[in-house]
């Protein structure tokens, strides 16, 4: 109910969306700054052929592995936009990049990341996806996982991705959106200078992950949240029966992944 209202306000006011989501992530990061084993904030990705797991971190990490496996990352300069609590930036180190930068507009998550990750060539920066604080052609690969639905102007974001990618560089992209609008997304990307090489509907994988992580999420919510807030947090966390879970299930909302290349 509370989370539905929140999402409706955000959908109705795209210009305010940026500020509303920022406030939400700032508060969450401040409240849970000591939860150092909480490194991801996505719905995760599971494959039916693999043994089921309720390891939330592993399920979220799978979404990143699904993206990282779309191209060769060895020796590349990687930027993640909307890096959240930094789990994706930590995971990409396994693929031997030259350097990794995580960017998020929440100062509190960036503060968390700077304290939590010191290994490898890894840097964290506060900034807005719609106005990136980097020179043209700075990165070989840009990653964006479950973040762009928060942005006020996605076209500005795609243009910034194209500007800061080197020629031929790759954009690894995953998020959810209304199914009726989805067919327009590849054209929107092309218009901004990003050619879609592959695209995939991964809603079933995300739903499977939501099913598998329910016991973990329920226990964590009981541990860290006051009773009156638990239902709303469960809705944001995408537990089965939540609005977002039902929208994935009934086809209203699609979760997609894409490999795009700077034209
Ligand atoms: C659902 S979380 C996903 C975090 C991370 N990608 C993950 O999968 O764990 C969305 C993240 O996007 C960030 N974000 C939202 N709007 C942003 C913007 N305009 N610029 C940069 N980061 C943004 C939020 O602060 C939040 O950390």
Image: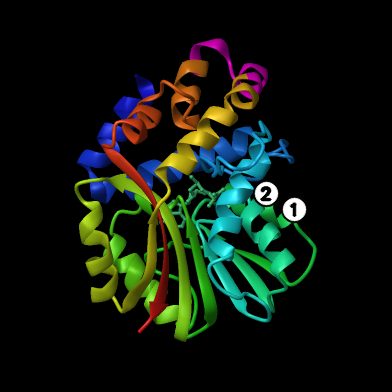
**Alpha-carbon span between mark 2 and mark 1:** 5 Å
Question: Where is residue 214 drawn, in percent x and y?
Answer: 57, 25
Q: Which residue is rendered at x = 30% and y = 67% of the image?
A: 156
Q: Is residue 127 magenta?
A: no
Q: Quadrant of the N terminus?
A: top left
Q: Nearer the viewer, residue 54 or 162?
A: 54
Classify 10 Å Cα crowding around label 1: few (below 14), some (14-19), many (20 and above).
few
Q: Check the image and report above or below for 93 versus 224.
A: below
Name the colouring of the figure. Answer: rainbow
Write the start and end of the magenta stretch as one range: 219-229
Q: Quadrant of the C terminus?
A: bottom left
Q: Which residue is rendered at x = 52% and y = 51% of the image?
A: 106
Badge 1 marks a residue whose secondary structure is helix
Tell me if I can see residue 124 in this picture. Answer: yes
Badge 2 marks a residue whose secondary structure is helix
**Residue occupied by mark 1:** 115
Question: Where is residue 245 drawn, in percent x and y?
Answer: 40, 30
Tell me if I can see residue 126 in this picture. Answer: no
**Labelled disc at residue 227:** none
**Residue occupied by mark 2:** 112
User: Do tag 2 and tag 1 residues touch (Cβ < 8 Å)?
Assistant: yes
Q: Is residue 2 left or right of residue 75?
A: left
Most common secondary structure along the magenta stretch: helix
The residue furthest right is 119
Question: Where is residue 220 drawn, in percent x and y?
Answer: 65, 24
């Amino acid at each position: 109910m509370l989370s539905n209202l929140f999402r409706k306000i955000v959908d109705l006011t795209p210009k305010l969306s940026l500020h509303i989501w920022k406030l939400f992530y700032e508060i969450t990061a401040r409240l849970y700054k000591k939860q150092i084993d909480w490194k991801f904030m996505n719905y995760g990705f599971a494959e039916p052929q693999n043994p089921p797991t309720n390891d939330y971190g592993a399920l979220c990490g799978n979404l990143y592995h699904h993206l990282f496996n779309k191209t060769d990352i060895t020796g590349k300069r990687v930027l993640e936009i909307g890096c959240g609590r930094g789990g994706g930036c930590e995971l990409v180190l396994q693929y031997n990049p030259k350097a990794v930068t995580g960017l998020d507009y929440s100062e509190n998550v960036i503060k968390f990341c700077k304290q939590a990750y010191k290994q490898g060539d890894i840097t964290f920066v506060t900034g807005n996806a719609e106005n990136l604080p980097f020179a043209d052609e700075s990165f070989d690969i840009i990653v964006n996982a479950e973040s762009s639905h928060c942005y006020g102007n996605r076209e500005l974001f795609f243009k910034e991705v194209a500007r800061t990618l080197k020629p031929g560089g790759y954009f690894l992209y995953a998020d959810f959106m209304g199914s009726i609008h989805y067919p327009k997304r590849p054209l929107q990307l092309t218009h901004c200078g990003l050619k879609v090489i592959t695209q995939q509907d991964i809603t079933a994988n995300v739903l499977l992950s939501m099913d598998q992580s329910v016991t973990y999420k329920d226990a964590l919510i009981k541990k860290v949240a006051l009773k009156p807030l638990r239902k709303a947090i469960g809705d944001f966390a995408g537990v089965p029966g939540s609005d977002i879970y039902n929208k994935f299930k009934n086809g209203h909302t699609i979760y997609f992944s894409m490999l795009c290349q700077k034209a």
